[in-house]
Image: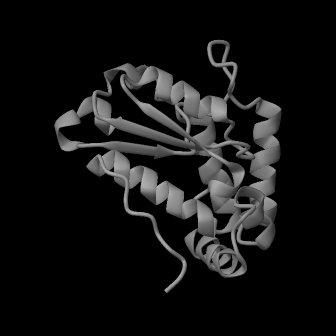
Amino acid sequence: MLAATDPHRIQALVLANTSARYLFDDDYPIGMAPKVLEVVIDGIRRTWGTETAVRGIHRHADEELTRWSMKLLRASATPRTAAEQYRYILETMDVRRFLPLVQTPTLVLHTRGHPLIPLAHGEFLASHIAGAKLVELGADESYFSADGYTRVLDEISEFLTGERPPSRSTAS
């Protein structure tokens, strides 16, 4: 909304695995059905801060990142509070009317096969923001995988600077 309502404060916008709206509506058929919302909220309540929660979204996270993510989740909210926060976000967020107002250069990154946010959401964002660029990431290219975060950073770097970073070598 800030990019739409106060554009002089925003030089570039990068959106990753997000949506203009999460719930189904008559004019938004790609949204989540109310029954699915209840399953998601129940899953958050039952698994928040556990390996199940982290691996459910970030299938390719390594062991160290999984442990770190579990600690971060537990430190950020209780399972009950997290479930209510997500309920609020998923039920109420709808920024569709602001998308045509965004004039800021926009990069939309979206992981194919994301378990909660289908690629159609990224496609919707990119098609409703003038000049937005959509980059589809493979399931193993999320920013929670060793190989994926490099591609994500390269895409963002090229978008912001106009140049692709030099190839990284794993050899020293």
Indicate whether 2 appears above or below 41. above
Residue positioned most to the top = 26
* Residue drawn 55% across the image and 25% down it: 124
Q: How many dots with numbers?
A: 0
Residue at image point 69% right, 19% down:
29
Q: Quadrant of the N terminus?
A: top left
Closest to the observer, 78 or 99: 99
Percent of width and height locating residue 165: 37, 59
Percent position (x, y) of residue 86?
A: 63, 49
Tell me which corner region of the image, top left, top right, bottom left or bottom right, holds residue 56.
bottom right
Expressed as whole percent of the image width and height from the top left, the position of residue 72 reads: 59, 74
Q: Nearer the viewer, residue 142 or 37?
A: 142
Give left or right: position of 11 versus 99: left
Task: Work out whether 97 lies above or below 108.
Answer: above
Quick check: can you spot residue 144? Answer: no
Residue 141, image quadrant: bottom right
Q: Residue furthest left?
A: 8
Residue 113 visible within the image: yes
Q: Residue at x 72, y 79 (%)?
A: 63
